[in-house]
Image (cartoon, grey):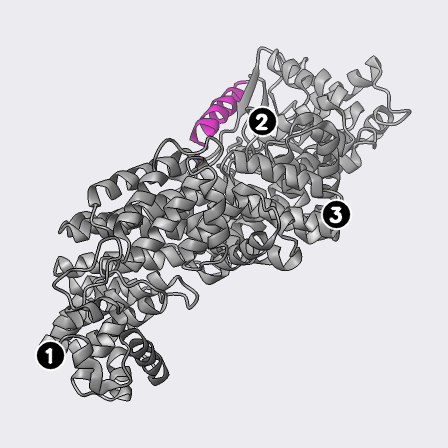
């Protein structure tokens, strides 16, 4: 590999100049380029191309020596005069005094130069000319203007930020050659990396090396040297290791040069790394104590170095550039800059979200109002993750109980859209922190989403507050009815009687219709009042929802009631309305419920493919908002559909992805048990399936869900009994339809039998088969005490004293 990369054009230019030097033609050459671009290396290559016996005068400038008068001139001429035995008196006289370059003095230095080239050409090479002392610069300029008939080549390197006047002066001479060093191309970078690491690099590694070095040879050489030392595999590099090496390389090269030569640009880069690349220049100037013009110049410098973009707003060209800048800042300094930046942005009236991002990284407690405002702005923009972060930070900074209560209410309202389980926990914490129901009714009303009562933790605060409201002398109408609707969907009857009386005063308004929908679901689940359930459901969907909130609980309850009372078309229409209102009100958890109900209806109608699509859509949406109870329900619905599609392995895999939370809604638990039973039955394990179906029925019956339309566990259990050869048990478990109270008892049905509930009829049938109470309890998955209680109630209803009178009382 040649020592110089990508420099063929430049070397050709200087070869031409050296050829001219042989015939007495002068040249003034300026090599311009950023730090590390290979200016010094190019100077070395030029000197190796010179004719034999050429006089070469060399000097290297440095800012620390710029106050020594004629320091550069002495570097150039001392070695030549000492080696050649020439008299130094004229030179010493010319280069002493007060440092001013008089005309006579410059002429004397010109004579010295002319004397040196009487026999052979001379080449004057000066590295970093802009750092030369002022008298030496004047000598250089004076000599450059007098080379018309002298075989002299003057070559100087200049940085990219060299004074424009100096560049213009040199470029105006007829024998001047200005050479701007270009960055290495991507191909040259890849070739260099391959040679240094001993093998062709991975495409992404080559691209990273080119991006980080910006085509700068010195940075690239340092980067590859470190990668070689760390034994980075060029074909299969570790991205984290390469990033770490790149960050350190950039810090020790480009950023170190910047710190030494342009402190203002380095400070601006630090501010951009800490405060954000889109920081306004005015803010940057205020934070650094610099003028805006200085900051603008610093921005141009950073753009020239390839670290940031040139436009507005300023952006880092690569994440590694910001990481390198941050690596040079101590923790305390970073926190202090965030603190000062946040205070300044707050005073300047910057957007609260911008200020909040800096407050998040400080230890200050003064920014709670800013964080709350930022959370509101983020919520309005539907950036719920950011709003949650701001409010949690505000909670950590607050110690005022009233403020903490307000923050918790605001946080729970945000988490309703972002993290449903966290919302349930905060709603529960609100009740614990402030048990005053009047104070809690408002915040809970904003959280009254039916999805929140999918678990016991989310339902508990509603039950507590409703109980308190129902016991109050004059409870507020809307909170009582809407919160009671939440409680009814959980399956609890807290505040039911008081709410029924309150709703009767104006049954057509929004709160009453929402309450009616939830009550319809409870009535339909019991299976005794189907016409009443449909009537309540029809009332719930009558007219538009409230203009200030969707009728979530009312619509969900109505959809369930229609589905469970044999009106799937109406249920589907309500589901469509639920999904639409969820979209309009940005309530994704409400859309999940609509999809779940629609999935269940699709499977009931024999369209398992549609049910599967809705179930998988509901699962994805539920998981996106942390609604793990609803996600479990969606997996169960999806598994049922997969079993119907004869894709049992997929169904089992779907159910195995997670377990149903212990505090999930009984209907969700039962749904999961049913799905597991269907998978077991499809695999031929009917004993396991039967136990799962009976457990499902036990949980539903314990919560008053006796309508077989809710979950057809009896049908599944009968099939399992049949597969196991227990045909009598199969007939028994499916022969007991629920008693309907919306119509007169069937005249053909014995009067005694009409007095008993479905659960009591099941007990009677098994007792008549000769089973003991313990055997009946085991068959129905109940306790013996529960069976004895059932029997006592049966005897009282039928007016008999014991088992031996059951047959006569029932007309058998």
Badge 3: residue crowd in 10 Å (few <14, some 14–19, many ≥20): few
State the residue position of label 3. Answer: 364
Secondary structure beneath dot 1 equals helix
Q: Nearer the viewer, residue 449 or 422?
A: 449
Q: Is residue 712 magenta?
A: no
**CB contact under 8 Å: marks 3 and 1:** no
In the picture, the disc for residue 728 is 1
| Observer-nearest of 409 and 497 | 497
Q: Earlier in the sequence, mark 2 or mark 3?
A: 2
Residue 6: in magenta span: yes
User: In which quadrant will I find the C terminus?
Assistant: bottom left
User: Up-down: is 1 above or below 738?
Assistant: above
Residues shaded magenta: 1-23
Q: Which residue is rendered at x = 30% and y = 45% of the image?
A: 559
Q: CA distance from mark 3 to mark 1?
A: 74 Å
Q: Residue at image x 52%, y 54%? A: 462
Chief secondary structure of the magenta portion: helix
């Amino acid at each position: 590999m040649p020592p110089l990369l990508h420099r063929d054009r430049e070397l050709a230019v200087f070869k031409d100049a050296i050829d001219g030097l042989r015939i007495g033609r002068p040249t003034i050459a300026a090599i311009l380029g950023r730090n590390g671009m290979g200016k010094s290396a190019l100077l070395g290559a030029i000197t190796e191309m010179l004719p034999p016996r050429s006089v070469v005068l060399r000097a290297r400038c440095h800012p620390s020596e710029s106050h020594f008068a004629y320091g550069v001139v002495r570097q150039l001429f001392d070695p030549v005069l000492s080696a050649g035995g020439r008299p130094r008196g004229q030179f010493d006289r010319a280069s002493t005094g007060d440092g001013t370059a008089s005309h006579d003095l410059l002429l004397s230095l010109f004579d010295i130069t002319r004397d040196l080239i009487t026999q052979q050409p001379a080449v004057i090479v000066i590295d970093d000319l802009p750092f030369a002392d002022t008298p030496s610069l004047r000598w250089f300029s004076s000599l450059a203007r007098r080379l018309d008939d002298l075989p002299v080549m003057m070559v100087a390197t200049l940085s990219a930020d060299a004074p424009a006047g100096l560049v213009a002066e040199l470029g105006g001479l007829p024998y001047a050659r200005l050479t701007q060093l270009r960055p290495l191309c991507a191909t040259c970078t890849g070739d260099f990396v391959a040679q240094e690491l001993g093998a062709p690099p991975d495409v992404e590694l080559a691209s990273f090396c080119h991006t980080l070095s910006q085509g700068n040879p010195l940075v690239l050489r340092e980067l590859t040297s470190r990668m070689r030392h760390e034994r980075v595999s060029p074909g299969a590099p570790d991205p984290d290791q390469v990033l770490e090496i790149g960050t350190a390389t950039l810090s020790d090269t480009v950023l170190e040069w910047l710190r030494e030569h342009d402190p203002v640009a380095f400070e601006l880069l630090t501010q951009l790394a800490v405060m954000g690349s889109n920081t306004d220049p005015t803010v940057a100037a205020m934070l650094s104590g610099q003028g805006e013009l200085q900051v603008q110049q610093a921005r141009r410098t950073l753009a020239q170095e390839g670290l940031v973009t040139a436009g507005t707003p300023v952006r880092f060209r690569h994440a590694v550039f910001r990481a390198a800048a941050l690596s040079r800042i101590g923790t305390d300094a970073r926190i202090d800059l965030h603190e000062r930046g946040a205070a300044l942005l707050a005073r300047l009236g910057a957007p609260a979200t911008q200020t909040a991002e800096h407050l998040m990284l400080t230890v200050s407690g003064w920014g709670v109002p800013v964080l709350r405002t930022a959370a509101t702005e983020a919520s309005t923009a539907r950036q719920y993750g950011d709003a949650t972060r701001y409010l949690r930070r505000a909670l950590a900074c607050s110690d005022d109980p009233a403020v903490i209560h307000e923050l918790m209410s605001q946080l729970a309202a945000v988490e309703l859209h972002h993290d449903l389980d966290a919302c349930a926990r905060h709603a529960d914490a609100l009740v614990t922190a402030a048990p005053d129901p009047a104070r809690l009714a408002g915040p809970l009303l904003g959280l009254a989403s039916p999805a929140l009562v999918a678990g016991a933790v989310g339902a508990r605060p509603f039950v507590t507050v409703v109980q308190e409201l129902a016991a109050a002398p004059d409870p507020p109408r809307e909170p009582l009815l809407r919160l009671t609707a939440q409680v009814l969907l959980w399956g609890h009857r807290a505040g039911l009687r008081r709410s029924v009386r309150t709703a009767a005063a104006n049954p057509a308004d929004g709160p009453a219709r929402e309450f009616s929908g939830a009550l319809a679901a409870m009535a339909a689940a019991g299976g005794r009042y189907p016409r009443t359930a449909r009537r309540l459901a029809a009332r719930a969907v009558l007219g538009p929802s409230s203009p200030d909130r969707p009728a979530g609980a009312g619509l969900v309850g109505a959809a369930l009631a229609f589905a469970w009372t044999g009106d799937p078309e109406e249920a589907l229409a309500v589901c469509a309305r639920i999904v639409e209102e969820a979209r309009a009100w940005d309530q994704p958890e409400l859309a999940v419920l609509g999809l779940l109900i629609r999935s269940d209806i699709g499977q009931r109608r024999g369209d398992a493919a549609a049910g599967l699509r809705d179930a998988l859509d509901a699962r994805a949406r539920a998981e996106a908002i942390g609604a793990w109870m609803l996600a479990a329900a969606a997996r169960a619905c999806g598994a049922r559909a997969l079993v119907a599609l004869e894709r049992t392995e997929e169904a089992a895999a779907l159910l195995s992805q997670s377990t149903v939370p212990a505090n999930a809604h009984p209907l969700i638990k039962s749904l999961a048990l049913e799905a597991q039973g269907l998978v077991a039955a499809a695999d031929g394990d009917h004993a396991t399936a039967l136990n799962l179906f009976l457990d499902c029925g036990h949980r539903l019956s314990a919560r008053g869900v006796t309508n077989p339309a809710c979950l057809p566990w009896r049908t599944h259990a009968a099939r399992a009994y049949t597969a196991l050869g227990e045909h009598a048990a199969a007939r028994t478990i499916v022969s007991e339809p629920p008693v309907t109270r919306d119509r007169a008892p069937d005249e053909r049905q014995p009067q005694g039998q009409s007095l008993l509930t479905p659960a009591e009829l099941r007990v009677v049938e098994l007792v008549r088969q000769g089973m003991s109470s313990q055997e009946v309890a085991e068959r129905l998955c109940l306790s013996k005490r529960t069976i004895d209680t059932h029997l006592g109630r049966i005897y009282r209803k039928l007016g008999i004293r014991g088992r031996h009178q059951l047959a006569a009382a029932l007309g058998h």
